[in-house]
Amino acid sequence: MTVKPPHAHLPAGVKTMRFLRGRGFFVMTQVLICLCLTGLALVGPLQLVLTEWALTSQEVEMSSKS
């Protein structure tokens, strides 16, 4: 005889909410914080690359006009 978990009869939404109330909420919060910090860490180098590209394209445009 197999024993079903006590939440086997509950709909998926209720199971998810129970998961989020426990340890899963902490884990999901940590994952979101890491994703946000990673995104912020990538913004600085991206700005530098875009600025350098814009300056280089302006220099090429100016040298081709003269």
Image (cartoon, rainbow, N blue to C red):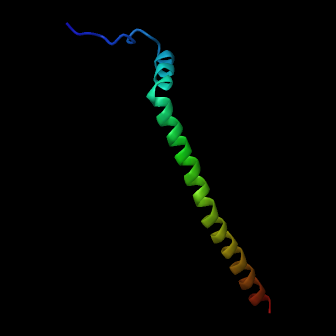
Image point (52%, 47%), residue name: 34
Image quarter in which the C terminus is found = bottom right
Along the horizontal axis of the image, is 37 left or right of 55?
Answer: left
The image shows a total of numbered marks equal to 0
Residue at the far bottom: name it: 66
Figure check: 42 above or below 30 = below
The residue that appears at 71% across and 74% down in the rendered structure is 54
Residue 51, compared with residue 63, is above or below; it is above
Tell which of 61 and 32 is nearer to you: 32
Q: Position of residue 52 (x, y in %)?
A: 67, 76
The N terminus lies in which quarter of the figure? top left
Q: Quadrant of residue 46?
A: bottom right
Residue 19 is situated, as x and y percent measured from the top left of the image, at 46, 23
* Left or right position of 1 against 26: left
Outermost residue to the top: 1
Residue at the far right in the pictured view = 66
Q: Find residue 37 and report its horizontal and vertical position in percent.
A: 57, 51
- Give the residue at x 30% y 10%: 4
Nearer to us in this view, 52 or 21: 21
Q: Is residue 26 above or below residue 10?
A: below
Residue visible at 55% across and 53% down? Answer: 38
61 on left or right of 20: right
